[in-house]
Image (cartoon, grey):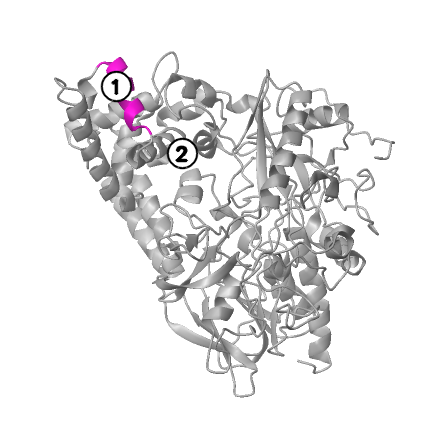
Amino acid sequence: MSARRFRNSETVDFVIVGSGAAGGVLARELARANLSVVVLEQGPRLAPADFEHDELKYWFKAGITADVLASPQSFRRAATLSAEVPKVRNPLVYARGVGGSTLHYTANYWRFHEIDFRERSVLGEIAGTGFADWPISYAELEPYYTRVDWEVGVSGLAGVCPFEPPRTKGYPMPPLPVKSSGVLFERGARKLGLHPVPAPMAINSIAYNGRPGCVHCGFCHGFACEVMAKASTLTTMIPAAEATGNCEIRADSYVSRIEVDKRGRATGVAYFDGEKREHFQRAKAVVLAANGGETPRLLLNSANAAFPQGLANSSGLVGKYLMFNYTARALGTFEHELNEFKSVQVTRILHDFYDSDPKRGFYGGGGLDARIGPQPTMWALRTATEGPGWGAAFKAKLQEFPRSMQVACHSTSLPLESNNITIDPAVKDAWGIPALRVTYKDHPDDLAIARFLQDRGAEILDAAGALRVTRAPVGDSSLAFHLLGTCRMGDDPRKSVVDRHHRSHDVANLFMCDGSSLVTSGRGQPTMTIQALAMRAGDHIAKFARRNEI
Amino acid sequence: MDDEGNARRTVLRGLATSLGVAALPWAEMARAAHDAHSAMQTPETLTYTLFSASDAADVEALTSQIVPSGATPGAREAGVTFFIDRGLGSFFSHWRAGFLDGLQKFQATCHDQCPGAERFAVLSSMRQVEFLRTVDTTPFFDQARLLTLCGMFTSQKYGGNRAGAGWKLIGFEDQHVFAPPFGYYDRDYPGFTAQPEKPS
């Protein structure tokens, strides 16, 4: 590998914090523009061969996620309550390691729709929320969505979904082979007059871009792909960034704060290496792509005399408007085996309920998909949604594993100031850095749309001939994989943290680009949009650098 | 065996140092898994390292009510008690104190509520079930259930799921490569056809 190495004392053009969905893309885009880039990743650099099918390690010992013992996060339902660190898992689940959460994601890659970017204008104000339009349109992002399809690698079938937003190009790969869950979902949905279509997935259905096709092992969600068929930036963007000779990926490098000079410009970042020794990487500009939890934490932990509320926080909105997306689940048991533990999570989706409909009496919309139940241990732990979770009847229920599937209903979360990331005044991590504190309670409309969609999911399972349909309880969220909205994008510096090009309103050479940039939540599956935003940000930031406008 | 074990430990420690702090739990877990796995190769020496014989009997009786034995294997056949014993001594050591404390309270409550019975394990199965109904919402029961299911269904290398008993019970196949058709319903799928009609 021709990866370049930089010294800390060298002032590189860009230091990027995070190597995940956005950080990986930005590294490649900026390095290709002939700019020098150091990427600091808090986790290790693992090879695909290191990844295992090991539920105990990945779900109960944190595996590649932030361990609750070393990297605790606290959680509370409201600012009036005291925050607690959970015993087993942190409330915000993200992967540590080169590749970030693209290591362990499901790789659902539908695009946001045109409506997502201008929903506030269409629907009007929603009292008590920060519901707003985006400063950019779908049309502006479309070329970058297409680049993600082709450069990251998305399999799918264009032109068959009547709700699909306009696209300039089809998918580079055909859809993945349908699973029994997809066939049943399609059958049930069509009986009800709905429009199920093959799921767009960032998983190779055939060999593409130097990576092989999927071998259908079934360990996507929560696990990293050992054959590289699932597109992680670890195996797509990062090697391409390194191949330019302009980029160094520095793993086990955990950033603690951003420093600014007297003029209020960022000078670089302080970080710990794998031996917990502190270093400082100088850079002409800093890009935060650390995810919607860690990016605001870093800004808040970088408070100083000139920025007492935290860096880039003149709006007071750093960390606020946290959105999780809701996932309601309807579970169906069928007569014959589906064997959903095989192959990718999702092979069919539908967007008939994507748009918010004022006639329902609440805000919200969503996308449904047919999917696997989780792998054995998580299946066993989650199965007992009714009756006692032990004894002979429970055992019989466990044995329904190969005959079960679920319809997962992915839906909107409204942006609320009261849902946020702050710094816990008491809890510190193993490096002595103040921990992040999550405050979150779903808006009543978020739960209403979740229940509405769950009913639709249950109807589909019923129409597909399920012997029994059950609903997982819908209640307030306390665990999230989608970390969105905490440094929102906007034109007005009083109402947003970054501008339309991801530059912070307050610090001219500081950029934030990841889930934190999102203004609204979409309907789940945010990674495609995060990567399209990063492709676009890379274009613009490279232009600024060339014109000496940073 | 000993030499091999020591050599592997040395390698793992070296690996942990080279990868830094983030990799340490993985190395510890690999060691624990190695030890549990080695112990299982020589069943005549299978002994509990944490539980006393009577504690082990209670834990076995409790976990066997969570996933009972019968025509198909349950927690007992999957070696769940051994898994919990080894786990609390290694990869789940942060739960050890809480579990042992909970177990003690569970035993004391059982002793109070079931006069004449010395311990939970000696109650008839019916009386065990009756008693469990009174405590199945306690944090200890939750933890015991979590550990039981981990011991049934996680990788055999951690000392449970003996001979794949848990996976066989639920029809899970431990393979890295599958090919379609995956199940009954996708066998004769004719292929996706677009629907011509537009939604109203």
Residue B80, how many percent across, how many down?
A: 31, 28
Residue A339 visible in the picture: no
Q: Secondary structure at mark 1?
A: helix
| Amino acid at circle 2 | Thr
User: Residue drawn 38% across and 45% down?
Assistant: A88
Predominant secondary structure, magenta span = helix
| Stretch of the chain drawn in magenta | B124-136
Helix, strand or loop at label 2? It is loop
Measuring from the top left, give residue A359's x and y in whole percent: 74, 40
Chain on which label 2 sits: B
- State which quadrant residue A451 falls in: top right
The residue that mark 2 highlights is B154
Label 1, residues with CA under 10 Å away: few <14, some 14-19, many ≥20: some
Q: Residue at x 54, y 49 (%)?
A: A481
**Which is closer to the viewer, label 1 or label 2?**
1
The numbered mark at residue A278 is none
Judge if badges 1 and 2 mark residues of a common chain. Answer: yes
**Which of these two is toward me, A88 or A240?**
A88
Residue B125 magenta-highlighted:
yes
